Image (cartoon, grey):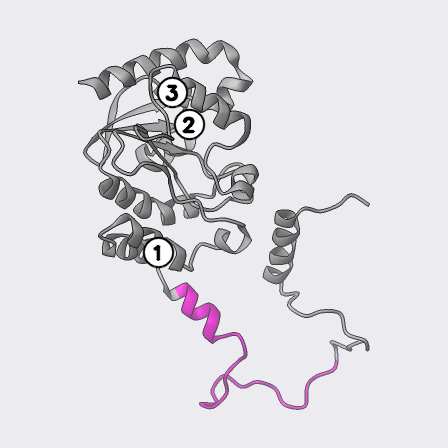
Amino acid sequence: MESVDFHTARALLEWQIELGADECIGDAPVDRYVLPEKLFKPNQPDAKPHLTKGPVALEARDPVKEAQSAAQSATTLEELRAALEAFDLCDLKRGARNMLFSEGSAGAPVMVVGEPPDRDEDRTGKFFAGPSGQLLDRMFAAVGMGRTGEAASLYITGIMPWCPRTSDPRPKDIAMMTPFLLRHIELAKPKVLVLMGNGACQALLAKRGISRLRGNWTEVAGRPALPMLHPASLIRNPETKRDAWADLLSLKAAVDK
């Protein structure tokens, strides 16, 4: 039998719960066609169905408004991290191994906003892990930038801190996390932003089509922003590395102004 990894098993269990299978198989069979001795009557003031309070309370909450309130209440990056850790309305949190908040030096001139964490990044707790991360480091090193060292010039985050169950995050998850991301930008105060890939463009520009958007400067949260191809895309399509190099030179010129 093929083994099932942690995330797949978690997703399958949650799917079963959503379908109503919230109990384990009992030792004795249950006849579901037998009427109970006492039927629940909604008009009885003291009658309270078992699951009414929880789901109704959750449905009454507005995740985006609560995210906006939690994000705006943070006055430092440490407070913003704590607000994210305490936020309980994004169910991706329950299936993730790590919460990815940031990497690099806060206050660096370039803030890179990447895609949602993939499974390697969720496992390691590090943005741009594996081959994509190695290529990203080589790319920025070529123009004298990096995410480590005393003179680190990159500050890295992502559009959401938890790994989604599919390669494309759900719009509702992006909407919930975007207030935290915008507040993150305000508190980090970078000189310029790099929107690395379609996910970052969708969250911050409400646009997709990175091949068309890349290389064209725009503005996000009052700061210059440059969409760029994600390193994973460059690995799949090596012929686009020439475009990435042109974007890196444009970024370097903007930082050096």
Pointer 1 with pointer 2, Cβ within 8 A: no
Give the vertical position of 175 relative to 199 (above or below). Answer: below
Q: Badge 1, how many Cα within 10 Å: few under 14, some, many 20+? A: some
Tag 2 or tag 1, which sits nearer the N-term? 1
- Residue sitting at 78 percent across and 43 percent down? 2
Q: Which residues are magenta?
A: 34-59
CA gap between label 3 and label 2 equals 16 Å
State the residue position of label 2.
Answer: 197
- Rendering coords of residue 238 (x, y %): 52, 12
Name the amino acid, label 1. Answer: Ala
Amino acid type indicated by mark 3: Phe
Residue 145 location (% of width, % of height) = 34, 22
| Of residues 61 and 177, the one drawn nearer to the viewer in this rendering | 177
- Nearer to me, 19 or 154: 154
Q: Which residue is mark 1?
A: 82
How far across and down, in percent of the image, does residue 32 sit?
74, 76
From mark 1 to mark 3, how far is it between C-alphas?
30 Å
Classify residue 250 by image quadrant.
Answer: top left
> Does residue 13 appear left or right of residue 86 in this picture?
right
